[in-house]
Amino acid sequence: MSTKTKTRFINIGSFVLGFGFLGALDGIIFHQLLQWHSVIMATDRPGQIVSDGIFHFAVTITLVLGGILLWVAGNPTNLSKGIRLLVGGILIGGGTFNIVEGIINHHILQIHRVKPGDPNALAFDLAFLAVGLLLLIIGMIIKRSGRPHLTSINA
């Protein structure tokens, strides 16, 4: 596999894995452990459970797909910046999940809030977006740092 192809698989696979991982964390923490919300709140409890189940199934498929892409890419340490691409991509994917899910579900569609019914619900929604933005920025910094230094031609 060429370096360019391997890099592409690592970039895409790590993004997809990070997107799925933050989706899984969202489902585990906010849907199940804290029970603050379900994907679709404007329904009865069985409807909420089904909407969460569909969400968890989609997240699981995303995690498996990301894992397969990274498996196909092979060992990231074979590239000069392979680990940075991997870690940065995971953080970028996770941050993208929070931003996309937060903007679409919390603000545009308004199908749920992070903590509905709380007097500070907007603050929770904005904090969710801020965490996503922070992950995205850190991921981009990690991916772009550590560029190989140019070797001087004059020896």
Image: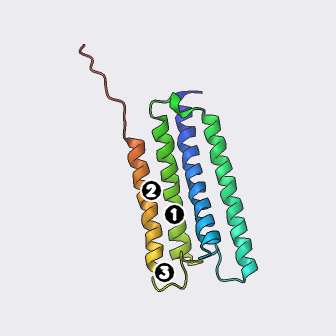
- Disc number for residue 135: 2
Q: Is residue 3 left or right of residue 134?
A: right
What residue is disc 1 on?
Answer: 98
Q: Residue at x 54, y 60 (%)?
A: 97
| Mark 1 secondary-structure assignment | helix
Q: Residue at x 37, y 40 (%)?
A: 145
Along the line of sight, which residue is nearer the eye, 99 or 125? 125
Q: Position of residue 13 (x, y in %)?
A: 58, 44
Quadrant in which the N terminus is drawn: top right
In this rendering, the answer to whether 68 lies above or below 74 is below
Q: Nearer the N terminus, badge 2 or badge 1?
A: 1
In front: label 1 or label 3 = 3
Q: Position of residue 10 (x, y in %)?
A: 55, 39
Figure colour scheme: rainbow
Which residue in the rendered view is the most extreme toward the top? 155
Q: Are marks 2 and 1 in contact (CB under 8 Å)?
A: yes
Label 3 crowd (10 A; few <14 / some 14-19 / many >=20): some
Q: Residue at x 44, y 55 (%)?
A: 136
- Disc number for residue 121: 3
- Amino acid identity at mark 3: Ala
Give the spatial CA distance, label 1 vs label 3.
16 Å
Quadrant in which the C terminus is drawn: top left
